[in-house]
Amino acid sequence: MGDQPFNDTFLRACRGEPTPYVPVWYMRQAGRYQPEYLNIREKYSFFEMNQIPEVCAEVTRLPVEQLSVDAAILFADIMTPLKPIGIDVEIESGTGPVIANPIRSPKDVEQLRPFHPEEHVPYILEAVGMLREQLSVPLIGFAGAPFTLASYMIEGGPSKNYHKTKAFMYTEHDGWQALMQKLGNVTIAYLKAQVSAGAHAVKVFDSWVGALNADDYRIYIAPVMEYIFDTLRETGVPTIYFGVGAGHLLDEWNRLPVDVLGLDWRTSIRAARKRGITKSLQGNLDPSLLLAPWDMIEERAKQILDEGMEHPGYIFNLGHGIFPDVKVETMQKLTHFVHEYSANKSIG
Ligand code: CP3
């Protein structure tokens, strides 16, 4: 792979530059829909896969080789930095992250330790360095955003309504500020280290922040997100921000010093543009469609591409992650379609 010319289409689109075709990659492109992943996962726990750089690099490369996507995303989890700061987290297959010692008081926040990536997760940085050598497409590094990390840390696992998290946020003013500050520093330290090790772009996942309304987002979250993206500017690499069900926060997001906004399937690309969103956009095929008949997938993908291609700075993706029942062939066909359709359309 190392001999192929470097494909920078994704990075150009992140920067809002025109591209010869629309670059594509998928959230959760490495995962349980791939038989090869399942074979490796049989031998290791999730975090063990993370901790062996050769395995981490192999799983990261798998979708690039199998699907011909235009970017790789590091195989890790938003939970990866939490163990070293004192959170006892495991990934349970089919459930997600489960935490044995959830945060229940400001005192618990005080006890969180600072995160030093080179010391705490050297194996991740080693995998990034290996991938930098091996890949001929950009490598996306990533981290969780403070609200989304806090939601797991306070609830103790996945949640539907985030009652405990919001109650902490509304009740413990100083404790919440301290938590956001600490997690903001975790995110910054982790992403800076990934860039130093070789990542070409970074993505901040704020998957569950759509649970807040725009006023609360502005009060409780926007300051720490501004601090994160402002600080990441120093790295010089493109930054991406993503959340699920967060269309009502787009105006707030558009004010952040971030390059690319990731949309889920509820907000169309055209609707976002109509609202005055000027940044590069990424998204947003409903992942459930991946189980629909091919004609329907193609029709929806075409519609999304038509909308996305109205402005430079567009990256095709799903509205959220691929799930285990999806077929590898469907993802191959979709990638091929995005490349072909967008290349012909821009020429024609
Ligand atoms: O290919 C990739 O996308 C790269 C790796 C990646 C994983 N998690 C691997 C993973 C990335 C970018 C993430 C981010 C992540 N993790 C997010 C943000 C993105 C999103 O989906 O909203 C969140 C909220 C998490 C927390 C988390 N970890 C969840 C919700 C789950 C899935 C639960 C399930 O079983 O479906 C995990 C586990 C996880 N992270 C898996 C993978 C491949 C499945 C692990 C397994 O093999 O059991």
Image (tube, rainbow, N blue to C red):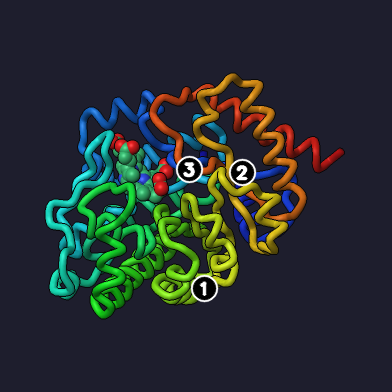
Name the residue beneath numbered marker 1: 233
Image side of residue 94 versus residue 297, left or right: left
Q: Secondary structure at mark 3?
A: loop
At label 3, which amino acid type do we have? His
Across and down, in percent, residue 156 comes to: 20, 53
Q: Nearer the viewer, residue 193 or 17?
A: 17
From this view, report whether residue 122 is shown above or below residue 42.
Answer: below
Name the mark on residue 316.
2
Question: Which residue appears at 28% of the width and 46% of the height?
Answer: 50
Mark toward the viewer: 1 or 2: 2
Image side of residue 41 versus residue 258, left or right: left
Across and down, in percent, residue 20 comes to: 74, 46
CA gap, disc 1 to disc 2?
Answer: 24 Å
Q: Residues within 10 Å of mark 2 (few under 14, many from 20)?
A: many
Question: Which residue appears at 60% of the width and 49% of the height?
Answer: 267
**In the image, ligand 1 is in what quadrant?**
top left
Q: Nearer the viewer, residue 123 or 319?
A: 319
Across and down, in percent, residue 107 comes to: 13, 74
Task: Report if the beta carbon of the residue with label 3 is closer than 8 angstroms to ligand 1.
Answer: yes
Q: Residue furthest bottom?
A: 174
From this view, report whether residue 214 is shown above or below residue 310.
Answer: below
Quadrant containing the C terminus is: top right
Across and down, in percent, residue 233 comes to: 52, 73
Q: Secondary structure at mark 1?
A: helix
